[in-house]
Image (cartoon, rainbow, N blue to C red):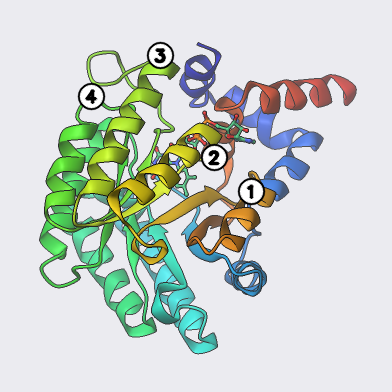
């Protein structure tokens, strides 16, 4: 309930001002975001790679309102991929990129977004790595999957994301797994209505487990994005049951969340990828992280009180 309220209120300019202006915010942002610039992102990638972790980099920003901005975001990705390639960090997909279709113009027309994503895929291929399209609000889901399906003709390793909270999730997993696609499975960070989504935590977790089973039994490459200890354990058991070797799927977690568990999984020989956001436009990302964990929100509110 609290989560839905915070996500709904996040569009308010007053809440935005309160959160971005609070002294406590900087420390929380720093714990979740690699920095503002591409060199910050490369530095953090270098450190994570040295620790045996894989990386997916996300240039922060979403819901781009004009073509010039969509092109500028695309340029950022192309430049970053060039730098990762030059340092050998992208080799064999070790560091890849995650792209929000609305950041590269999805709501300006699917042609705009498809063109920009194709440019990013070409730069990724040149660097020796892959691209994954993030899943965003419900209105973006179908156009994103359509763009991905079209671009996969030329870039078969273009990955996409299924949000287990959506009622369509299991059917999407079946379709994608049947085509051998790289699929990231997450619970879903957006607030969606009952008509299209499970809203009770228990139902989302059950849907995640069903989707997990479909992906692990399918012919694609599952990417299990969760910090939930129970789901991580189920993934391990399913890998055993389905005979999947450690190179045929991966775990994914967010930068700054459960880092010890990230290292533990990597040390078992599993592929463990850290999703690393960077850039100045961190507000929406931060609100989603605050909303999904009441303890974070309580910490944030207490520090607001202390700074009055
Ligand atoms: C690699 C990756 C990529 C993602 N991509 C997308 C995407 O494309 N689209 C999308 O909608 N969502 C995406 N998400 C977010 C996801 O949907 C969830 O909102 C988020 O991961 C929290 O869900 P959980 O599975 O970790 O389970 P939860 O039940 O929320 O959390 C399980 C446990 O993880 C820890 N934890 C979870 N969140 C936090 C936090 N913010 N701070 C500290 N500890 C925490 C806590 O110990 C908690 O008990 C992604 C998540 C990951 C890990």
In the image as oriented, which residue stretches furthest toward the bottom?
86
Gap between marks 4 and 3 measured at Cα? 12 Å
Mark sitting earlier along the chain (4/3)? 4
Mark sitting earlier along the chain (2/4)? 4
Above or below: residue 95 compared with residue 212: below
Q: For numbered disc 4, what is the local secondary structure?
A: loop
Cβ–Cβ below 8 Å for labels 2 and 1? yes
Q: Position of residue 87 (x, y in %)?
A: 54, 86
Q: Mark 4: few, some, or many residues within 10 Å (few <14, many ≥20)? A: some
Q: For numbered disc 2, what is the local secondary structure?
A: loop
Above or below: residue 156 compared with residue 215: below
Q: Find disc 3 in the rendering and name its residue.
A: 200
Q: Position of residue 85 (x, y in %)?
A: 46, 84
Gap between marks 2 and 1 measured at Cα? 9 Å
Classify mark 2 as within 8 Å of ligand 1 or not, answering yes or no: yes
Classify mark 4 as within 8 Å of ligand 1 or not, answering yes or no: no
Q: Find disc 2 in the rendering and name its residue.
A: 227
Report the front residue among 270 and 254.
270
Front disc: 3 or 1:
1
Residue at (66%, 69%) from the top-left corner? Answer: 51
Q: Position of residue 3 (x, y in %)?
A: 52, 19
Tally of marks: 4
Cβ–Cβ below 8 Å for labels 2 and 3? no
């Amino acid at each position: 309930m609290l989560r839905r309220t915070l996500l709904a209120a996040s569009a308010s300019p007053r809440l935005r001002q309160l959160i971005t202006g609070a002294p406590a915010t900087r420390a929380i942002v720093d714990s979740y975001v690699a920095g503002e610039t591409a060199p910050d992102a490369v530095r953090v990638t270098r450190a994570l790679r040295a620790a045996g972790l894989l990386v997916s980099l996300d240039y922060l920003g979403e819901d781009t309102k004009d073509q010039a901005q969509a092109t500028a975001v695309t340029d950022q990705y192309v430049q970053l991929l060039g730098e990762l390639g030059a340092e050998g960090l992208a080799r064999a997909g070790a560091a890849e990129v995650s792209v929000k279709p609305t950041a590269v113009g999805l709501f300006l027309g699917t042609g705009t977004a498809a063109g920009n994503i194709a440019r990013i895929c070409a730069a990724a291929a040149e660097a020796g790595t892959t691209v994954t399209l993030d899943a965003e609000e419900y209105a973006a889901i179908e156009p994103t999957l359509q763009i991905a399906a079209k671009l996969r003709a030329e870039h078969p390793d273009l990955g996409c994301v299924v949000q287990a909270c959506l009622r369509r999730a299991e059917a999407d997993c079946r379709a994608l797994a049947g085509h051998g696609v790289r699929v990231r499975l997450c619970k879903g960070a957006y607030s969606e209505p009952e008509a299209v989504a499970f809203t009770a935590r228990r139902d989302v977790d059950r849907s995640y487990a069903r989707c997990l089973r479909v992906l692990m039994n399918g012919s694609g490459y599952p990417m299990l994005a969760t910090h939930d200890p129970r789901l991580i354990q189920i993934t391990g058991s399913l890998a055993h049951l389905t005979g999947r070797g450690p190179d045929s799927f991966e775990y994914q977690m967010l930068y700054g969340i459960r880092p010890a568990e990230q290292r533990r999984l990597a040390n078992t020989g599993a592929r463990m990828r850290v999703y690393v956001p960077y850039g100045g436009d961190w507000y929406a990302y931060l609100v989603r992280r605050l909303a999904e964990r009441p303890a974070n929100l309580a910490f944030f509110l207490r520090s607001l009180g202390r700074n009055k």
